[in-house]
Image: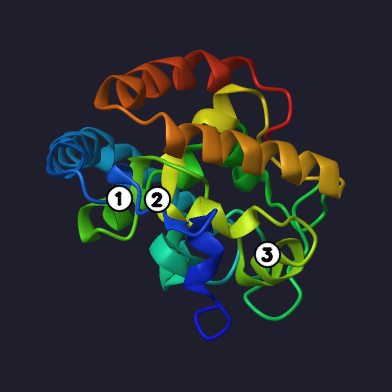
Amino acid sequence: MTGSFNTEALQRDGVNMAAQVATDPFKRCFDILVASLLLIFFAPLLLVVAALIKLESPGPALFRQTRGGLNGRTFTIYKLRSMRCEENGDKVVQAQRQDDRITFIGKLVRSSSVDELPQLLNVLKGDMSLVGPRPHAQAHDRYYETLIPTYNLRFQARPGLTGLAQIRGLRGATNDVEDMANRVKSDIDYIDNWTLASDIRIMLMTIPHLLLAENAY
């Protein structure tokens, strides 16, 4: 992804749209403060779940995968492992409902999004933000950037644990290009209209969406 990313894709009508969302110091301070508090709060839960994952199936408790981040730079994302195998190559198959790769503990952590909590470490490192476009596997980035002209505009912001697309119900596996195009549109809407207040609103709205979402598996 890094080698093929073209910064010209982040221009509209010849004007560089270097979004404030990527550079605002208050957003970064907010990320560090809240991510630190959440990591301390959830640390006991993460340790228990990690132990259960290790007991249920062989392999590491922590899943690592290369994703595309700010300005197309790659980073290693952290998740609790929910499958019996890891995919990080040229072909990554999205998890589907009744996917037999998902373990019993994996189903529980995926449905509750507990598997995403280690990404608080990514936020502290500066790879991610609490709110922003959800990062995709590199194989998916390469596939969709050839089909959706505006796809790379989403790299103007740091990837987020949650985002505008997620609270609009555009969460989980994408079944066709139109689904991804709608998600990308939401990501660009977020970037174009970002405020710190909007981040707080999206975070608060994420909680009921996590509890009621039917497309988390």
Residue identifier under label 3:
84
Residue identifier under label 1:
22
| Crowd class of label 1 (few under 14; some 14 to 19; many from 20; radius 10 Å) | some
* Whole-number angstrom distance, CA of label 2 to CA of label 1: 5 Å
147, above or below 209, in the image: below
**Badge 3 amino acid:** Arg
Regarding mark 1 in the picture, which secondary structure is present there?
helix
Regarding mark 3 in the picture, which secondary structure is present there?
loop
Contact, CB < 8 Å: mark 2 with mark 1? yes
Residue identifier under label 2:
157
| Crowd class of label 2 (few under 14; some 14 to 19; many from 20; radius 10 Å) | many
Q: Is residue 151 toward the left or the right of residue 34 in the image?
A: right
* Whole-number angstrom distance, CA of label 2 to CA of label 3: 32 Å
**On the image, which quarter does residue 56 sit in?**
bottom right
**Badge 1 amino acid:** Ala
74, above or below 55, in the image: below
The mark closer to the camera, 1 or 3, is 1
Residue at horizontal 60 percent and vertical 44 percent from the top: 105
Regarding mark 2 in the picture, which secondary structure is present there?
loop
Name of the residue lying farthest toward the bottom = 3
**Could you say which is closer to the camera, residue 94 or residue 104?**
94
Q: Earlier in the sequence, mark 1 or mark 3?
A: 1
Name of the residue lying farthest toward the front = 14
Give the image location of residue 106, x and y in percent: 62, 47
* Whole-number angstrom distance, CA of label 1 to CA of label 3: 35 Å
Q: Earlier in the sequence, mark 2 or mark 3?
A: 3
**Badge 2 amino acid:** Ala
